[in-house]
Image: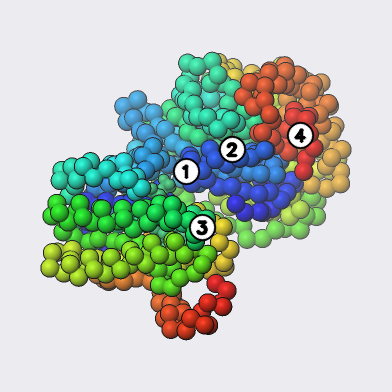
Amino acid sequence: MREEVVCGFSRSRCRKARIIKPASWGEAVRAVREADVILPAGNHYSYGDSSLNRILLDMRGLKRILHWDDEQDLLTVEAGMTLAELLPWLLNRGRFYLITPGTKGITLGGAVASNVHGKDHHVHGSFIHSVEALTILHADGSIRTYTKRDRAFTHFFASYGLLGIILTVTLRVKRIPGTRILAEHVKTRNLRETLRILYRMEASLPYTVAWIDTSARGTALGRGIVMGGRFIPGRLPLKRVKRVPFSLPGWVMASERFMRFANRAYYALQPAGRRVESVDSFFYPLDALRDWNRVYGRGFVQYQFSVPRAHAEAAVSRVIKTMQEYHLLSFVSVLKTTGRERLRGVFDFTQPGVSFAVDIPLTNRTGRLVEELDRIILKHAGRVYLTKDSLLTPEVFKRMYSRETARFKRLKKTYDPTHKLVSDQALRLGLIRGERV
Amino acid sequence: MRRWEHAWLTGATGGLGKSIAYQLAREKRVRQLTLLSHTPGEAERTAKDLAYRYGIQTRVISFNAEKPRVKALRDAARKDMPSLVILTHGIMPPEDLLDPRLAERICRVNTLSMITLTSILTKEGFKGDLVFVSSVAALRAKQRNALYGMSKAALTHYAEAVRQYGRQHGVHVLEVRPGILKTRMSEHVSVPLKEPPQRAARHILTALDKRKHVLYTPGWWYYTMLILRSLPARVYDRMKL
Ligand SMILES: Cc1cc2nc3c(=O)[nH]c(=O)nc-3n(C[C@H](O)[C@H](O)[C@H](O)COP(=O)(O)OP(=O)(O)OC[C@H]3O[C@@H](n4cnc5c(N)ncnc54)[C@H](O)[C@@H]3O)c2cc1C
Ligand SMILES: NC(=O)c1ccc[n+]([C@@H]2O[C@H](COP(=O)([O-])OP(=O)(O)OC[C@H]3O[C@@H](n4cnc5c(N)ncnc54)[C@H](OP(=O)(O)O)[C@@H]3O)[C@@H](O)[C@H]2O)c1
């Protein structure tokens, strides 16, 4: 056991924690039995305090490949495995994740616990749709396996480590013709066009996403670059990661002028049209710069929400305008269409419509801006993504997730009546009573 | 770099054993690896991982060092004799110098089980490399872990004798004396200079390549022990170690 300061990815929330890193299931069971409170943690790529607690069970020591069925494309792996570590193994076998988020830094346990989504949400839905079975270490120390056919299966998705600890994940992976992606980039002039092209691409391409220039105003508001792609035959190697060895002073990143410059430059310099990309450059562009979150200096908050399709244009444009009013712009701003889903996790934020994510530099105005964004989202029947949240209040949270909260409380009674599994976020949102210590 | 057709390894669920298993597999030094473990479920998961990642053949045999099942082990050796055997299992429980029961248990696991395995293997005609993991604690006693030290001292003694026996019988013995490893066993020992098990494993494989007989890891423990061993009782007993 060691004591360390741990932070969420945005470095806006940090705390001291005691960390237990089991190297075997036996050690994990013992840790859970002996603890009065504990929280499983992956690679801390959640942005806020979802993965923070006084005592953490660091799952990254458990990352063995336990089963591979080459005919059925089924792979069972321990939950501490990161997507990055597994990726070369998969690509060598001509396979890829059925569903992957925009980073390969996360663990499989984290992917389940946040029920993550990727550029193919409109086709496959959230991560749950790529999982066939889970092995769960319960709060009482018992271990059980749940398959897709079990009713309880969905309880461990988007429940943020609060209902059980994921030990193994059985993934369905997909066959790919090669490791190259034929990508299409379209520059758009405003939000309406961005959405129109996104919806159009969605019909023909499995992967779509749009980057938004948050500095553009007036008739250009919501302009950006819509990207789509699909795998094609041929091989392209994975890239080596570069390091960002510095922190920029907070005022640089927070300065509106710098952000406006960065947004405009990116919009202007990205070539439109078709090109071939590698898995890394297409799916994981942000990972190319390791520790890029450090460039924000003091830290930032990430804000991601979903709204129903009918509200998409109104909600997204209102959000961008509000950020501009506060002189806080975002550079990594991602708009994605989200589809209908068969299986639902506990605190899923997605709904048929769109999701929009922005990085907001941490300044003394940020809190007020986020409050205002929350009000906008509520008005548009939207929901904030908990894995990115660090500022939501219990009141707003309850309005966004009222049914989910009621269900969660029932499940908590079943799986963890003594409230052993606790996170700072759960305490902050009033999901679990108690004080953060 | 030496390679072996088939190896037996104990303690692969522990810090040092696991590191050895992964290095053997990653460097394709073995084609077949058999893990002997008293927690076979856990060992099975490691065995699967080794096989899927590195394409070697792996297998698990149930082995409890407190009461080894001689017949099952003999059958396994007969069926598929290894040419490399690495015995890393061991325990270092909180101690009481005056507890004969505990002394017995520690000796069973750390010493007697090693003798049992050596005897089974040699009687079945084992030829090849045999590695015993002892400890620097074997060389001089300390009240805090007297029983552990005693069990390792006996092992060191035994290993030396097997080495002599082996010269005529095609068995090469390597006896390893780690200092303090950064593993679960010494989690509660707070010293700054713990050796990562990966590095100790690397040293062990290199020592095998060089056909060494005794290995201190890290190497400076050789000099430390030379000094400690030469100290008179009056001085040594008062030292806080
Ligand atoms: C650059 C970047 C891009 C991203 N892009 C996307 C994206 O495109 N789509 C998307 O959906 N998300 C995205 N995310 C968010 C990220 O996928 C999630 O936050 C993910 O949950 C992080 O996983 P982790 O392994 O780092 O877990 P952590 O951040 O350590 O933990 C996240 C949550 O999972 C729980 N948890 C972790 N392991 C286990 C386990 N074994 N058992 C039970 N609970 C566990 C923790 O308790 C915590 O509640 C992105 C994040 C970054 C930094
Ligand atoms: N750690 C140190 O500082 C240090 C210093 C000098 C020498 N050593 C020696 O190095 C060797 C490896 O130790 P380590 O640091 O890797 O310790 P470890 O992590 O505690 O590993 C010990 C291994 O022995 C196994 N084992 C324990 N009891 C057993 C039994 N009854 N039957 C079968 N296997 C049993 C354990 O299996 P389970 O995990 O399944 O219980 C585990 O695999 C030991 O011989 C130790 O004495 C260690």
Query: Can you identify the residue that label 3 sits on?
Result: B95
Q: Residues within 10 Å of mark 1 (few under 14, many from 20)?
A: some
Q: Which type of secondary structure does the marked residue at label 3 adopt?
A: loop
Q: Is mark 1 within 8 Å of ligand 2?
A: yes
Q: Earlier in the sequence, mark 2 or mark 1?
A: 1
Foreground mark, 4 or 1, reads 1
**Can you tell which quarter of the image residue A263 is in?**
top right
Residue A388 circle label: none
Q: Is residue A212 left or right of residue B105?
A: right
Q: Are marks 1 and 3 on the same chain?
A: no
Visible residue check, residue A314: no
- Tell me residue A175's x, y (percent): 38, 30
Q: Are marks 2 and 1 on the same chain?
A: yes
Foreground residue among A212 and A152: A152
Foreground mark, 2 or 3, reads 3
Q: Are marks 2 and 3 on the same chain?
A: no
Query: In whole angstroms, how far apart are the C-alphas of marks 4 and 2?
Result: 19 Å
- The image shows residue A280, relative to residue B24, as above or below, that is above
Query: Can you identify the residue that label 1 sits on?
Result: A24
Q: Residues within 10 Å of mark 4 (few under 14, many from 20)?
A: some
Query: Can you identify the residue that label 4 sits on?
Result: A427
Query: In whole angstroms, how far apart are the C-alphas of marks 1 and 3?
Result: 24 Å
Residue type, label 2: Val
Residue type, label 3: Glu
Query: In whole angstroms, how far apart are the C-alphas of marks 4 and 3?
Result: 42 Å
Q: Are marks 4 and 1 on the same chain?
A: yes
Foreground residue among B97 and A233: B97
Q: Earlier in the sequence, mark 4 or mark 2?
A: 2
Query: Can you identify the residue that label 2 sits on?
Result: A32
Q: Is mark 4 within 8 Å of ligand 1?
A: no
